[in-house]
Amino acid sequence: VGEMETAPKSGRDVPPKKDKLQTKRRKPRRYWEEETVPTRDGASAGPPCNKKNRELRPQRRKNAHILKKSRISKKPQVPKKPREWKNPESQRSLSGVNPGPGSSPLPRSKAKTRSRLEVAEAEEEETSIKAARSELLLAEEPGFLEGEDGEDTAKICQADIVEAVDIASAAKHFDLNLRQFGPYRLNYSRTGRHLAFGGRRGHVAALDWVTKKLMCEINVMEAVRDIRFLHSEALLAVAQNRWLHIYDNQGIELHCIRRCDRVTRLEFLPFHFLLATASETGFLTYLDVSVGKIVAALNARAGRLDVMSQNPYNAVIHLGHSNGTVSLWSPAMKEPLAKILCHRGGVRAVAVDSTGTYMATSGLDHQLKIFDLRGTYQPLSTRTLPHGAGHLAFSQRGLLVAGMGDVVNIWAGQGKASPPSLEQPYLTHRLSGPVHGLQFCPFEDVLGVGHSGGITSMLVPGAGEPNFDGLESNPYRSRKQRQEWEVKALLEKVPAELICLDPRALAKVDVISLEQGKKERIERLGYDPEAKAPFQPKPKQKGRSSTASLVKRKRKVMDEEHRDKVRQSLQQQQQRHKEVKAKSTGARPSALDRFVR
Amino acid sequence: MTANRLAESLLALSQQEELVDLPKDYLLSGSEDEGDNDGEREHQKLLEAISSLDGKNRRKLAERSEASLKVSEFNVSSEGSGEKLVLADLLEPVKTSSSLATVKKQLNRVKSKKTVELPLNKEEIERIHREVAFNKTTQVLSKWDPVVLKNRQAEQLVFPLEKEEPAIAPIEHVLSGWKYHKVVKKGKAKKALKEFEQLRKVNPAAALEELEKIEKARMMERMSLKHQNSGKWAKSKAIMAKYDLEARQAMQEQLAKNKELTQKLQVASESEEEEGGTEEVEELLVPDVVNEVQMNADGPNPWMLRSCTSDTKEAATQEDPEQLPEPEAHEVSESEGEERPVAEEEILLREFEERRSLRKRSELSQDAEPAGSQETKDSSSQEVLSELRVLAQKLKENDQSRKQKASSEGTIPQVQREEPAPEEEEPLLLQRPERVQTLEELEELGKEECFQNKELPRPVLEGQQSERTPNNRPDAPKEKKKKEQMIDLQNLLTTQSPSVKSLAVPTIEELEDEEERNQRQMIKEAFAGDDVIRDFLKEKREAVEASKPKDVDLTLPGWGEWGGVGLKPSAKKRRRFLIKAPEGPPRKDKNLPNVIINEKRNIHTAAHQVRVLPYPFTHHWQFERTIQTPIGSTWNTQRAFQKLTTPKVVTKPGHIINPIKAEDVGYRSSSRSDLSVIQRNPKRITTRHKKQLKKSSVD
């Protein structure tokens, strides 16, 4: 916890470069860097560029379709990080250092196995190098907001940002005044191009928010609890007062799913084509939208469910409960995969970041906590907010937004992989009504806020991932491309039952079955075929095959084996001693160290 | 030891035999030194008696030795004396007399002669042979080890392994046999003439000799009835000639040949005449020679080049229609005797030769076939070109031998030059040098990126660790007592966290005293919190209990004691029949008070997991590590994806995959390598052999 607070902010530590700036009016000078070249200069030079009071660069996207490589390069990191973290043994082996015969039987393994392992290692290294290398192709850099010496970026209001950015980016900040139909929930499509929102009083609309082209606008004449795009922007799931309805982008009702009733929250798992619904009745229902079947209906046994979020890393659903726990669900299990006691009061909001590493929760105890999801489930940082956060959301680059009443606070981390530090907000914004829905727009530096006064789209520099994968989620895709992508995505659909806490579990051997199979085989055969045959002395002639001599010979062989083992272990011990010695000698403090400053 | 003794006894035997041949007078009489012997014998007996006291030499004692006193005229016996008879003993008395020098010499010779060792018995010899043969074969076969290993470890194998050879039938087969042989014949004649011409220039005397030989061959031809249109072939052709243009041409050709051969030469007695004759010949030949020179001057024949380079079927088949009509055209115009077609023939022939050599190089096992064809070709040419062949052989033998050698050397280096090519080719096929290059390049280029990449997450990890440790540390004592755990959990949840000072404080509709409201909230939450924590702990305890393996109680109430309502089996009995379940692995949430992790197995996932270890792996982690890296295009760059998914074996459809041959992997020929292998390591075999011999001799 403390570390976050003490960590200095790079932007604030930079000394003022020119005196004239201080004499200037407090109002900051801003500029929008249009070309990539100056931005690169700014990024590399840092301080020299500080003559501009603030550097504000909401990222701009090129129209060129970045190839798959652009994203691919990042993807390997995602599974790698947790893996390295989770099992240090594999990491040790990855580093190429043999962990010694004691901890692993590698040195004794056969040459063939060893060569296979070496090949695998080499392959992995090669692919990772290639992936790292292909990051060169990521042309776009994320935007950022940097305050001058000691200036709080939270003081920068949207008007300042809009004034600073180019017209195209400025157009992304807008307000929709829809006071009539009450607090709005909203959802961006996966490509970030389309926006759907539904008001409490039945107003449902979908639009291409960049061009502001309205796709459909209907009134369902029923309370809308939540709204969500399905795999593409052509389908829309709306949780209405009684049942779940699905509309197309024309506003035509396609389905009314009566098995999902009194749904309060919706989540869509894009790789599994699952629509997860949390209902007032306490059921978590998974609906496979590709075949229209309910995969699982799980009773959470925790009363009304109205806090739900998904973990984009492993597609686990997080449910917040009134008893302060957050439970993690998979359609494969009837019970929660894990239960975490997070708050003393009920949980009001849950959000998981895109890497699946951090979970932010806020409870009735007015606290906002960030949990580590990689095994320990311990809070990393905790803050008490004046009135608690009712809504939380993570951006693609790890920014955390909390909606508290009619105010949204945004916190930023140090880097992409770090949790947001709750010490100081990155941006704040006051809305015209209490917040009811929050979501960062994918691939854009935009935060959409649904509130009682309508919809607000605000600019948050550095929120979105600047480089998109043209083959995966392309904001500029045509209808044809979308259809093609749809087919491919359907072909690559992941079975629902594979959802588990560790998505890499499939790459592991089912040890229990393995052992079981071995045991059964031994039982069936009557002996262990893999066991080393015990030494059987050959019968000898001329009276030398007496029982005593046989025993003697057996013992001799046994002793020899034992001696070998002892010798090996002794060698290992010696080695370890040596290592320890080497370490200790290396780390020994010198008397002269006291003079080192 | 035993062998030595054996040899000695043998020696003694032979000596005895020799001694038998000696005249009687030379024999020693036993009575002469009897007195001397008596004392010795007694002494010996005494010694034996003493030595027999310990009872070991009883058998020796039992031996009777009455014959020892007798002196046989046929045999020398040393029995009874207790020592062995040595040749020197016999020779001692002979020493003095010089007349017995010859005998002495003979004896010495006998002595110096070495005995032949006993031949080993059959089984041992066979065993040795087997061993040697085994060693030899293993040596021979061991040359394949690196090849096999390489192929096994190769990332990709492309079959067929051998270099792509022209898939067309050799041109001999394309052309009809008859036509082909005709072309060959012509070429041979041409060659012979050329060689003769050269010989004439270099060595006139030899040329004269050659000429004589040619003349002789011609005479022989005249004498025989060849080319008389009397053969089977000629008769059939004569019938066919009416209808078939080709047959007619062949007939005409043969007739012309006959005429040429049977034409009586004016024997020129004078040298001038001969000079003129040769001049005539020269004149006749000049155009060809000129042609040749021109062709040579032109450098490599474009046709040949094409034939060399074009390995593909299509090219060859394209060539064939061009080639085919030409001999025919030549046949038609042969009577006119032009130079151009001759040159073309040369070209054709060369092509054949080229192809043949290529084929030879490419495949050694199929060597037999070309050789056979050559033989048939030779036999066919023998009919017509006997004289020329003789000439050619002669030429080869004497004058042109060095040239031939040079040419043969030329071909060998060519072969050797060609040999490394497959070797170079193979890695090309197996390893895909292009990718390797790029990999190296990548390694060079991507080093810093990789470095950065590795560096980047580290501080984060460290940070996490440093964050985690304070969290984990308080956990450690928790495991001991539930109370402590609870307290800690409460601490965890009720710790005062710094509140955020936000610039924008949310506006609250009801204007209430914030302090008071906070207080109320706090109290409420405190009460609620207690409940929450207690509930959670209870839940966790239940979950832990539920996941624990259950003990099995096998006590039967009423056995061995009174049973009934209200009566419980005794504690002792219960203890005795209670099977304690083995302690399960520690729970994942053992040290995490605020977490309940479900330990139940996800059978749906398990259904997709590997449950049988593949062959070379002995531990599951080994296999896991090899499948750790995802190979899909979703997680990899395009090139990495392609590399990871290259098939292990690539075969070309429609191509025969022959078994691997020595030439494919760069070995020249099997016999040579065998020899070299054996020569390389002769020591081992011989030492083994020796050892074997020694062993057997000892036995």
Image (spheres, grey):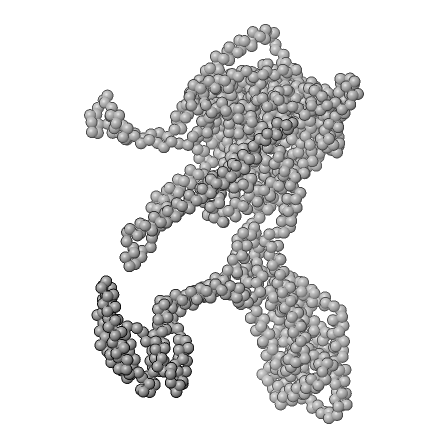
Establish if B459 lies above or below B290: above
Q: Which quadrant would residue B311 be assigned to in this image?
A: bottom right
Residue located 54% across and 52% down the image: B153
Drawn side of residue B657 relative to residue A171, left or right = left
Establish if A505 lies above or below B381: above
In x, y percent, where is residue A250?
A: 62, 28
In x, y percent, where is residue B379?
A: 59, 79
Q: Which quadrant would residue A65 be assigned to in this image?
A: top right
Image quadrant containing the C terminus of chain A:
top right
- Viewer-nearest residue: A171 or A363: A363
Residue located 55% across and 50% down the image: B648
Drawn side of residue B266 relative to residue B40, left or right = right
- Viewer-nearest residue: B279 or B508: B279
Residue located 55% across and 46% down the image: A119
Q: Is residue A235 visible?
A: no
In x, y percent, where is residue A279?
A: 50, 22
Establish if B73 lies above or below B592: below
Residue located 54% across and 44% down the image: A120
Image quadrant containing the N terminus of chain A:
top right
In x, y percent, where is residue B316?
A: 65, 64
Drawn side of residue B182 relative to residue A94, left or right = right
Q: Which quadrant would residue B586 be assigned to in this image?
A: top left
- Viewer-nearest residue: B677 or A116: B677
- Viewer-nearest residue: A150 or A246: A150
